[in-house]
Image (cartoon, helix red, strand yellow):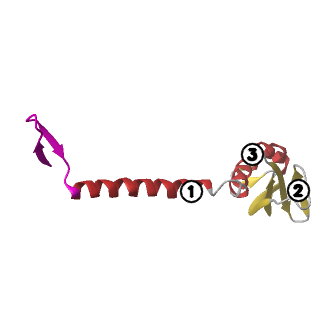
Amino acid sequence: MSFSWTREGRERGQASPLAALVALFAVCTGVSIYVVALGGTAALGDDRTYADPTLHRVSEELADGGVADPSALGTAQSAAPDGRRLNVTLTAGDRRWTAGPTPPNGTPTDAASRTTSVRFGPGSVVPGRLRVAVWR
């Protein structure tokens, strides 16, 4: 930092031009990073997917030790995201269990599914598929 004298004889601080340019560059870079990060979150808006995290929560509600229990399907509605409707379908073999309203035709839905083991009865476990559909 260089110093200059005023008429009254006191020192007055001045920044070198290089230090001022480096500080300006740092501020501009920080603002640019902030705008890019903010733009990335604003772009999510209403287009984000709800099905994958909802499928995970429903699977945790239904499964005990990794095996889904069809009788617990009614509790799966508590996993619905706020402001959204949820349909849960569990299929195994030729059997099918459903909880929640049916998605209306023409309404955009977000859906996800995964394979899971399904308990048919004591000691009877068969492969099946768990599917969720989420819509507004």
Residues in magenta?
1-17
SS at circle 2: loop
Dot 2 or dot 1: first in sequence order is: 1
Q: Residue 71 appears at what percent x and percent y? A: 85, 47
Res 36 seen here: yes
Q: Amino acid at mark 3?
A: Ala
CB within 8 Å, label 3 to label 2: no
Q: Amino acid at mark 1?
A: Gly
- Residue matched to label 3: 79
Res 66 seen here: no
The residue at 81%/59% (across/down) is 109
Q: Residue 19 appears at what percent x and percent y? A: 23, 55
Q: Is residue 88 left or right of residue 15?
A: right
Mark 3 to mark 1: distance in Å?
29 Å
The residue at 22%/57% (across/down) is 17
Mark 3 to mark 2: distance in Å?
16 Å
- Residue matched to label 2: 103
- Residue matched to label 1: 39
CB within 8 Å, label 3 to label 1: no
Q: Tell me, yes or no, whether the highlighted magenta stretch contains residue 53.
A: no
Q: Nearer the viewer, mark 2 or mark 1?
A: 1
The residue at 45%/57% (across/down) is 33
Dot 3 or dot 1: first in sequence order is: 1
Q: Residue 56 appears at what percent x and percent y? A: 69, 54
Q: Amino acid at mark 2?
A: Pro
